[in-house]
Image (spheres, rainbow, N blue to C red):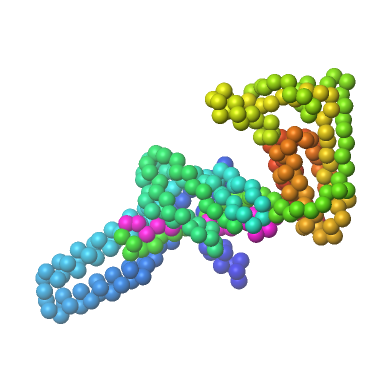
Amino acid sequence: MKTWLSQLLRVVHAGDRSEAVITGRKIYILPTRYGMVFGVLLLTLLIASINYANNPAFILTFLLTGAFIQTIFYTWRNLLGLHLRWRHADSVCAGETSHFHFQLFDPGGRAHYSIQMGFPGQESMMVDCSDQQYKQVALAMTAERRGRLHPGRLTLESRFPLGLLRAWCYLDIPAEAIIWPRPMEGALTQTRTANNSSLDGDRGTGTDDFVGYRGYHPGDSLAQVSWKALAAEKGLLVKQFGGDRVDQLWLDFSILEEPDTERRLGILTHAVLKLSTQPVHYGLRLGDLEIQPDNNERHRRDCLTALALYGEAE
């Protein structure tokens, strides 16, 4: 029964580049409570005009009826032609709020006002989409557990211009966010450590002696950024250390003493977040998956994503 009703429901599906286009046949429109009161008022005025044969009352009734009919068109048109494109979602830890980022625009250059957007069970947001501009919208959703967060069907609605009618449509957007495990403090005494040496030295990537600065590259650890140099308006510089030893730390899921899987993942998540701010190379062993030691933003996200999706294929 539910599947049959779902097939009858008119839904806007995203096409290429996760972009959805709202067409006229996908828009529903019904009177609001104020619209129904307004309709009752029009009916009362019509009956009174007929009963008393009052010409000014007829003129007022027809004038208000014409305004109501025009409102139907403008409320429906306020959604017509809108394009919605999903950009990305913020990865956060379980229990935090993730934001889904969208672009709202009209290639025809028409302005749209008071568009209300929201996911089921979440607080909606009111936005205006001006002509020939991309409106950036971030919809918040609370992440209750780790893994892939699918926000569900997106609803766009409009009550512009008079609030007498509500026009709305449903959109299926392939949006998802990766939710990391909730960080938990715990003992890592069983985690393996190692020191690696190189005959050629570490060429500025070691941990022994400070040798100078270099320019910042995307992915560099924030722990090695020279904030004093940035405050002195010398630009974004990264500290370089010499020596022939790079400390390596392995985070191994299998040797943790905690019996609960989610607590193990939480402990490892806390360790990754903490070690990513220190000049230490760390790796992750998670079942059959092994991520080699490193320390940069991409490595941090790879480790946290692996922890978030642990056991997904099982």
Quarter of the image for the N terminus: give it: bottom right
Q: Is residue 195 left or right of residue 215?
A: right
Q: Which residues are magenta?
A: 143-161
Q: Residue at x 82, y 44 (%)?
A: 251
In front here: 202 or 106? Answer: 202
Quarter of the image where one finds residue 261 = bottom right
Vertical arrangement, residue 20 with respect to residue 279, above or below? below
In front here: 156 or 137? Answer: 137
Q: Is residue 95 left or right of residue 22?
A: right
Q: Residue at x 70, y 39 (%)?
A: 277
Report whether residue 112 is seen: yes
Q: Is residue 149 magenta?
A: yes
Quarter of the image where one finds residue 151 = bottom right
Q: Is residue 129 left or right of residue 68?
A: right
Q: Please state the horizontal and vertical placement of residue 88, each as a whole percent of the image.
A: 59, 44
In front here: 235 or 163? Answer: 235
Vertical arrangement, residue 210 with respect to residue 34, above or below? above
Quarter of the image for the C terminus: give it: bottom right
